[in-house]
Amino acid sequence: MTKNVTTPRVTELTKIKITVINYHKGDNMEYLRSTIARDACYTSKNALRWKTEALSKVKQEITTLLDQVGSEIVDVQLARKTDLFHSMEDELEELQIRHDSDLQVHKTVTGEVWTEKPKSFREKNSQAVLEAARAILAS
């Protein structure tokens, strides 16, 4: 459920977030504003991912309970898991609105469409890092 949606709620949230980011005024704060917008996209994307995985786990638990229906304990657990699943679906919808808003904010602040970049697993040259650290301390 990762689709970009423009709704009045997304638009309203976007305006609020842009106001907060623009609190940091001046050309010298441009990098800060773009970093805040980028970080918000990463955070909201991770929240969506986490909630989707949690929903999947609850779904698996419901599947397991369905195989054991009949006892009062299982029926109560199934009812609780079903309620939990529905409330988590509502949360996922809110998280999607948040992410859609963050994407719009990023586009407004930076002029670019945010894309998730994979983590770098490149090892740093330890000698180069030491030399760079020494150069910083020498200046």
Image (cartoon, rainbow, N blue to C red):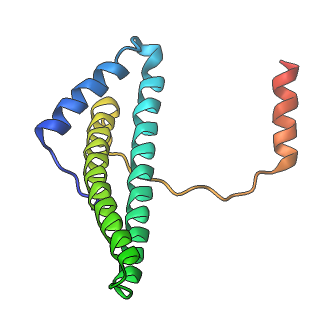
Front one among 61 and 117: 61
Q: Is residue 98 above or below residue 25?
A: below
Q: Give residue 6's position: percent from left, percent from top.
A: 15, 44
Q: Residue at x 47, y 15 (%)?
A: 28
User: What is the residue that sits farthest to the front in this orientation?
Assistant: 72
Q: Quadrant of residue 55?
A: bottom left
Give the left or right position of residue 125, taking residue 122 as reference. Answer: right
Q: Nearer the viewer, residue 109 or 43?
A: 43
Q: Residue furthest toward the left?
A: 8
Q: Give whichever of 138, 18 is nearer the camera.
A: 18
Question: Furthest residue to the bottom?
Answer: 67
Q: How many marks?
A: 0
Q: Where is residue 90 drawn, in percent x and y?
A: 25, 52
Depicted 130 relative to depicted 64: above or below: above
Residue occupying image coordinates x 40% and y 74%: 73
Q: Nearer the viewer, residue 44 or 50?
A: 50
Q: Is residue 85 above or below residue 29?
A: below
Name which quarter of the figure residue 112 lies in. Answer: top left
Q: Position of residue 40 (x, y in %)?
A: 41, 38
Give the percent coordinates (x, y) of residue 85: 31, 63
For the point 32% across and 47% down, the residue is 95
Q: Quadrant of residue 52?
A: bottom left
Q: Residue at x 47, y 32 (%)?
A: 35
| The N terminus lies in quadrant | bottom left
**In which quadrant is the C terminus drawn?**
top right
